[in-house]
Amino acid sequence: MMRVLAALAVLVLAGIFAPQARAGEVCNETSYYVEAAKAWGGPQGLTAHGWLRIAPGACARFAGIPGGVNQYLYARTTDAYLGGVREWLGRTPVCVDRTDFHIEGAANCEAQGLDVREFRQLSPSERTRAVLVEPDDFGDRALEAGVQRLLQTLGYEVRVIDGFAGRRSRAQIAAFERDAGRSFGSNYASLANALHAAAQEANRQIGFSVCNNASNTIGVAVARQRSERWQSRGWWRVEPEQCVRVIAERLSPGETFVFAQRLDGEDTEPLQRGVEAFCVAPGRFTAEGRTDCDARGYTSVLFRASPVPVDGVARLTLDDSDFEEMIQ
């Protein structure tokens, strides 16, 4: 089987050697739960569909793809893991949404409030079956490696992710079963699902949340420094007396800023006492960089610094006074 390394991950040309595979199948031989999306050519441009969650060692099928058309694939790790999202990607920009989506012929992603991800074009054989792998070739040990990684993510003492269920791994599985109050026996798939759910729950507090104690709904945007480049994104809608997690990664001090506006019918009232300028747009947006906002079709507004994170967690609560100008 020939493997082709690409960026952070590898796609394997496996369809030619798998006559039993179904068209549009994507298999996960990594140690991560992933969310996958596919795009394919059509008369109106690219059609994109996602997200399909695929457990380590499992496969999923994208239905409804016409035969003989170009196909593109992108995958990312779920929010069960700390340390940022890992991606399986390429060089073809495709519009995607943040939740499950089916998009036909989208061209101007930003104008439609959509994100852009770089998809990898699949070879003809990969259109039938493509495999996601890591530099560590887990192969049929992917499920065991996935269990080890989730145990490690949850703080259990797993030192090596190798896909071999040795004595230490079995001891940590037993510890998780005691903590969970149930036994999974030889059902590794159910064990992995339980570990994944536990890891997602444990990570729900990690990151940056904004709570709304104002009398109106608010729209929230955030700006972050990513790899020495600033990026601003919005909008998250936060109803009164609710909180929304706008960043689901561990925070470092000084890297995050926030802007909000109080929504009252057609009127908006911006957050006061901002200190740093970043770009925003009326609809959903992702703006790279923080300069020349007007020339690029954005508006420059002042963001506040987020609260100093503690153990990677920060929370900001806004009320009506945050949107009212102070009287001198």
Image: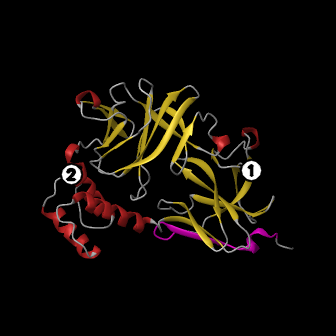
List x then y, in percent, for residue 320. Answer: 75, 73
Residue 236, compared with residue 7, is above or below; it is below
Task: For label 1, count other residues whose C-alpha is less than 10 Å away and answer few (under 14), some (14-19) or many (20+).
Answer: some
Q: Which secondary structure lies at badge 2?
A: loop
Percent of width and height locating residue 224: 58, 54
**Left or right of 287 on screen, residue 178:** left
Density class for disc 2 (Cα within 10 Å; few <14, some 14-19, many ≥20) is some
Three-letter amino acid code of the residue under disc 1: Ser
Coordinates of residue 283 in the picture (x, y in percent): 69, 49
* Quadrant position of the N terminus in the picture: top left
Residue at 71%, 48% (x, y): give it.
281
Q: Secondary structure under badge 1? A: strand
| Residue at x 31%, y 67% (from the top left corner) | 155
In the image: residue 131, left or right of residue 75: left
- Determine which of the numbered discs, if any, sits on residue 162 in the image: 2
| Residue drawn at 16 percent across, 64 percent down | 170
Q: Does the magenta segment cover residue 58?
A: no
Q: Nearer the viewer, residue 85 or 282?
A: 282
Farthest residue to the right: give it. Answer: 328
**On the image, numbered disc 1 is attached to which residue?**
300
Q: Quadrant of the C terminus?
A: bottom right
Please report whichever mark, 2 or 1, sits nearer to the chain's N-terminal start.
Answer: 2
Q: Which residues are magenta?
A: 309-325
The image quadrant that residue 186 belongs to is bottom left
Q: Which circle, 2 or 1, is nearer the viewer?
A: 2
> How many numbered marks are there?
2
